[in-house]
Every structure is written in C-alpha cells, then in structure tokens.
Image (cartoon, rainbow, N blue to C red):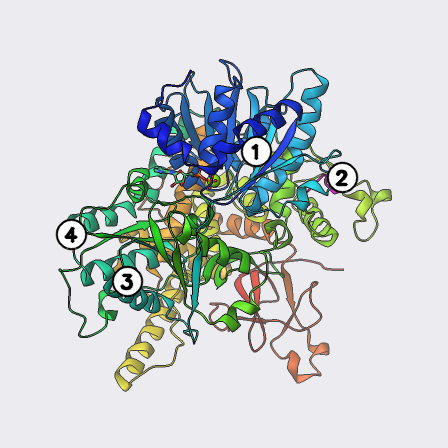
Amino acid sequence: PVNRTPEMQEERLKLPILAEEQAIMEAVAEHPIVIVCGETGSGKTTQVPQFLYEAGYSSEDSIIGVTEPRRVAAVAMSQRVAKEMNLSQRVVSYQIRYEGNVTEETRIKFMTDGVLLKEIQKDFLLLKYKVVIIDEAHERSVYTDILLGLLSRIVALRTKRNMPLKLLIMSATLRVEDFTQNKRLFTTPPPVIKVESRQFPVTVHFNKRTPLDDYSGECFRKICKIHRMLPAGGILVFLTGQAEVHALCRRLRKAFPTRCSQPQEKEEEKDSAEGMRRFKKSRTRAKKAQAMALPQINLDNYSVLPAGEGDEDREAEMDDEEEALGSDLDLDLGDSEANEGEQPDASLPLHVLPLYSLLAPEKQAQVFKPPPEGTRLCVVATNVAETSLTIPGIKYVVDCGKVKKRYYDRVTGVSSFRVTWVSQASADQRAGRAGRTEPGHCYRLYSSAVFGDFEQFPPPEITRRPVEDLILQMKALNIEKVINFPFPTPPSVEALIAAEELLIALGALQAPRKNERMKKLQMSQLSSPITALGRTMSTFPVAPRYAKMLALSQQHGCLPYTIAIVAAMTVRELFEELDRPAASEEELAELKGRRARVAQMKRTWAGQGASLKLGDLMVLLGAVGACEYSGCSPQFCHANGLRYKAMLEIRRLRGQLTTAVNAVCPEAGLFLDPKMQPPTESQVTYLRQIMAAGLGDHLARRVQNEDLLDPKWKNAYKTPLLDDPVFIHPSSVLFRELPEFVVYQEIVETTKMYMKGVSIVEIQWIP
Ligand code: ADP
Ligand code: MG
C-alpha cells in the first residue's frame, strides 16, 4: 500500500494518464509488450512505474526498471516518484554512470539506457527485473534502439522459461510504426495505448527574419519584451549548450535583478565543476571495481589476452549534448556583450534558473518549485526540457530553433558537435511546453519559411553515424551475426561492413579464415566473433581505434601518454582559430604575434629527432602536458593559443579514461599526474607504433618522382582510401618535413584535402 499525502494525491488526479490506469494495467496483464503514447507532461514517467508498483509488479528479488536516455531524467524522476509515493530513495532509486543510490530495498530503479545495456552483458535474461520500461523511446537514441532489439528476444526467452518479463515502451509521440510494424522486432504487434492530453492552445509567433547567428542575443531581447509587456506566466527558453545557458542567465539577472540573485550565481559557477568532481569520486570507486588483468601487450603478439568480465563501473558514452565533449560552438556571451544603455531594472524581478544535464540534481529541482512572490520564473534550458522534464507554470516558450548534435565525419568517423536547426516535430514539442496549464505563446526566433525547410522528424541516431563502437559492444554481448539483429531501424549494410572490416583490422574481431575471405567482406560474412583484445577494447569509452591504442599501451609505461593523446584526439581542435580576419591594425598585429608564438610552441612541443617523428601527436602530448603543468589556467591557454574549454574537456576525458583503465587493470595504479614527465626517446618510438596500430588504415605515402608529371601532385600523398591527392595540413609540424610514410588522424576538405594529426611511420616494404 502506498501512503501518499492528500495534496500529492490531488495533484496526481489532475494528470491525464490517471484516466488510463485501468486500460494500461489490463494491457500489461494480457500482453508481454505494451506501448504507451502520450504528450509530454501527461504523466507517463512519473505515474506508470507507480501503477506497476501498486499492482504488485515488484518484490524483493524482482524489481521495476525504467530506462532514460538522459541522466538528468533518471535522477530527477527517481526523486519525484519517491516523493509522490512518500517512499525513501532507498526504495525508489537511480543508477547512472559512476553514480547511484540503489540499495537492497530498491523496488523501482531509474537508470540510463547504457546502464541496462551493461547489465545485459552480465545477466542476459535480466532476472532481476519483473518489468522493464523503456522511456522516451521516440528519441530513438542508439542505446534505446539496441535495448529494444535485445529485449524483444529476452522477453521471448523469459516467457519460454515461465518467468515472464513485461516490457513497456513509452513515447511522447504517436510515431511508433518502427516498433509496431516491424515483424522482425515484434512478431505480434504490441498494443498501443494512447493517453489523451489536455493541451491548451499555443499561439505560435514566427520572427519575420531569422538572425544569422546571434540567437542568444535575440533570445535576450525577446525575453526582455515578454517580461516587460506580457501578463504573468513562466518563460521557458531553449538554447543549445551549457555555456550559452549560463551566459544568458548572467545577462538576464543583470537586467532584472532580484534580491537573491548574487549568491545564486556564484553557486552555479561552482556547478560547472560538478562533472570534474564526479570523475574524481569515480576514480576511488573504480579502484574497488572487479579486476580484469590488462594483458602485457607485445605489439607483435596480442593473442595472449585473457577473456574476462568487464568492469563494474563503465557505462558507454551516450548522454546528450552537454555531457559530451566538444563545445566549440558554445558562444561565449561575456558581460561585455550586453547591450549598451541596458539599465538594470530592479522593479521587475525575474527568477532566472538554468537547466541542463550536468547541473547538480538539487539545482535541477529548483525549476519545479514556484518562484518567489512577486517574481516571474524564467528557465533557460537546453534540449533536456523538450521532452524529458516538464516544468510547471510555463506560459511562454522562446525557441532559438537550434540543437547541438553529434555529427560524424564520413571519411574518418570522428565525431564533432554542431549546432543545427531542429526538426519540425521537435519545434512543435517545444511549443507544446507553453500550453500545459493555460493557453500559451511560443516565440520562434526564425521565420516560418525557415521552419518549412526543417526536416519533419529527426532521423534515428543509428542511421546517422558509423557503427563500429556499437558493433563492438554487441559482439561483446556475443551477438555475432549483427546483420540478423532486430534493429527497430537498421544501420545501412555499408556501415555494418565498414565497421566489421575495421574491427577485424584492429584485431577486435576474428578474421574470417583465408579461403572464406574475399577481397571485401560480404554481407553473409558479418559474423566474426569477438577476440579477447576486443573485449578489453569494449571497456574503454572511446572509438575502437583509440581503444586499441589504450589496450596496447600498458607496456613501457606508455599509458599516461596514450591517454593524453587519445583524449586530445577525441576532443579535437585544441588550438584557437588565429587565421581569422582582423578588424583593425592593432588586432592584426596581435593575431600575427600570437600565430608566431603558437607556431613556435608547436615546434617546441614536437621537439627534435625521435620525438619530432611522432609529429602532431607529439604536439598534442606536449600541449596537454605543459597546460597541466601550468595548472590549466585560462592565461596559459590564451598565451599559447590553446582553447581553454578544449583543455578542460581533455582533462575530464583523461580522468574518465584513467578510471576505465584502472578498472580493467588496478595494478596499473594510474592517476592524473599534473607534472607528467615527457616520454623518453624509446617511449616515443613505442608511441609511434601504438598510434600506427590504431590508425593503420589511415596510411599515406608521398607520391614518387615518376608520378610527379602532373603539377597537382607536388608535395602530395596518396592514400588507399581516396583517388585524389591529399596534403599535409599547413598547421602540421610535419608540413615542411614531407616524410615518405605518414599516418593521419583525419582528412578535412577545404580548398584541398588535408591530413591533420600527422605522424611518421617507417615501412620497409610495400607491395
Ligand atoms: P511525461 O513523462 O508524460 O512527460 P511526467 O510524468 O514527467 O510526464 O510529468 C507529469 C507531471 O508531473 C508534469 O505535469 C510535471 O509538471 C509534474 N512533475 C514532474 N516532475 C516534477 C517535479 N520534480 N516536481 C513537480 N512536478 C513535477
Ligand atoms: Mg517522460
């Protein structure tokens, strides 16, 4: 029995999903798999777990599991449900990467989808659970998609063994054909229960013109107008990233101060360091994690790897934009940018709150509280507020129309973050946030013509990216014939073949026997089992190429160096863009001076002789080492042309990788040494081999004299991948060296095809 407070009970009864409780519970009783669709805010996430709990779907040894694609939702929803049920967080708990409060008493467990995927690797039948709820399935995150494929089989197996598992899929949109019409996924289409939502009309206002890039400034002006001129009601603003959110909050608080805005701001600055603290904590924990010996790797022979279980703590990378690395696109709107003549107006206090994934849970919880008397609530949020969280009392939505997304380089598969237009479906979701409690207004900071050009729905993530990391995870689950896997939407066969080829080349998968192997892999051959090396690689949260480098680095004390280089390669663009046009003579002189300084530092970091052969990767290592040595200060970064944010991200990722390596191999006893000594000459030689082992297919050879007839081939390189010539990028320290063989991190196409992240390899013979 649940003892809710009368006030809570009253609040619940207002939710549209309460009317469907019986229908949902009947469907769950009769069918192994049920889909529930309902508008954001209708009560799916908070209520359905309670229905199941009250109907007895949890006991001491089999509980209710709920997955969320975002950490923010896993934490916030566990707190909310515990509160609604008047139960402690010992009973309604959460687990996200490296952090959680699950106990023996836990009956309802909220977790990220990656945590559940990891649990499947340990216990394929998920015997701990009586019900699994996959929430926010419409977001189509890669891990949600894979979980659905796996769960379709797990549910069947559990039925066969007479230990039925119930699966609920919850979606904020009605677009669920990929689940219901996919016979391979679910042979019997699961019933769909629609929750009628009580949505008030929202008037949508488009801008006449679309601002070119200063959408943060446009947001600011729009909010000022709303706040000055329109009746009471909360404002919800959509921006793309954490830095933007903070900048706009600062600016708004300055314009419309409340009595308590000062201390609040200071505390939030502290929150930005939250991520760092989490990783520090996780390091201690990883030490306790189960040991799996990382093999002593010999570059010529890695067949000696023992197979073992993965570590306890690792959770794959899957969270949303601001959890991830790479904030190149965060506009830094400093105070300097505030409009001149903007006077602080204390007569109109605005209660400004930020909301994004990395924000501490107590701070996130602030948005659910009513604002102080006499103030208006204004929440400045990233995409997390689109569907995951519902904020009460919102009457006005200001939508910049943009979202930060991960994009993948088709040539190299390296990912980056870009800010792009959202889909029409997302824009409508955002607008819908304004009509929960009364009729509302949505201000779109773009024209209706631009909206007309948005794509209708965002394509599922799995179709937009290379899949070698997924394939490696799936193979680690012993799913060998990936092509037969019941994906809700499968990746392309080309993407699957490319992934399998690369993983075989990296030694993560067994190569097909010689006589079976054609020149190129065929579809029917997509069934290579994982190797012991592959299992080790699958525990590192970076691209398989980089995981291979880490797996090889235990010997000769190379690990700290490889971790630094891999972190730097993953974050990318360490150096500031100094080739920009200058606005004035002084600026030009300053830029020139800084360019010369950066070039000089690159040469210093690359060194001479053996160390120069590691090329740009040596520069990365030197830059990371020197920056840490200086305490990673903004001053040091500015003076040396390094992007401060990139350096902070690298530090964070190094912490994470150090934790992952320690979990696999506790005797390595790695820690982040701020005074890391430079590698010795022989270590550099080892590092070059390690880098080449991960970048082996990114090999380029300088064209030979006989090919030089065509002038376009001057100083050019030939790669196996491309017909056209490629060149060493002018920013490379090897630009003038022109070595015969190089490996590169990536190719970028501007005026020519340029290799970046270049390092020298020596090859005796090439057929
Ligand atoms: P859905 O999952 O269908 O989007 P939720 O179950 O998340 O809906 O939310 C249902 C209602 O509960 C919303 O109207 C929201 O305002 C309210 N709610 C959710 N979390 C909190 C919270 N932490 N504090 C106060 N109200 C909340
Ligand atoms: Mg929800």
x then y, percent, for residue 32? 66, 26
User: Is any atom of residue 388 visible in this view?
Assistant: yes
Query: Could you say whether the residue bearing mark 1 is in a helix, strand or loop?
Result: helix
Which amino acid is tagged 2?
Answer: Lys
Query: Left or right: 275 with respect to 563?
Result: left
Dot placed on the residue nearer the N-terminal end, 2 or 3: 2
Q: Quadrant of residue 709?
A: bottom right
User: In front: mark 3 or mark 4?
Assistant: 3
Mark 4 neighbour density, 10 Å: few (under 14) some (14–19) many (20 or more): few
* Tag of residue 183: 2
Nearest the viewer among 309 and 23 is: 23
Nearer the observer, disc 2 or disc 4?
2
Separation of marks 4 and 1 at Cα, in angstroms: 43 Å
Disc 3 vs disc 4: Cβ atoms closer than 8 Å?
no
Residue found 21% across the figure and 58% down from its top: 253
Give the percent coordinates (x, y) of residue 655: 39, 42
> In which quadrant is the N terminus drawn?
top left
The residue closer to the viewer here, 661 or 522, is: 522
Q: Mark 4 belongs to which amino acid?
A: Gln
Which comes sooner in the sequence, label 1 or label 3?
1
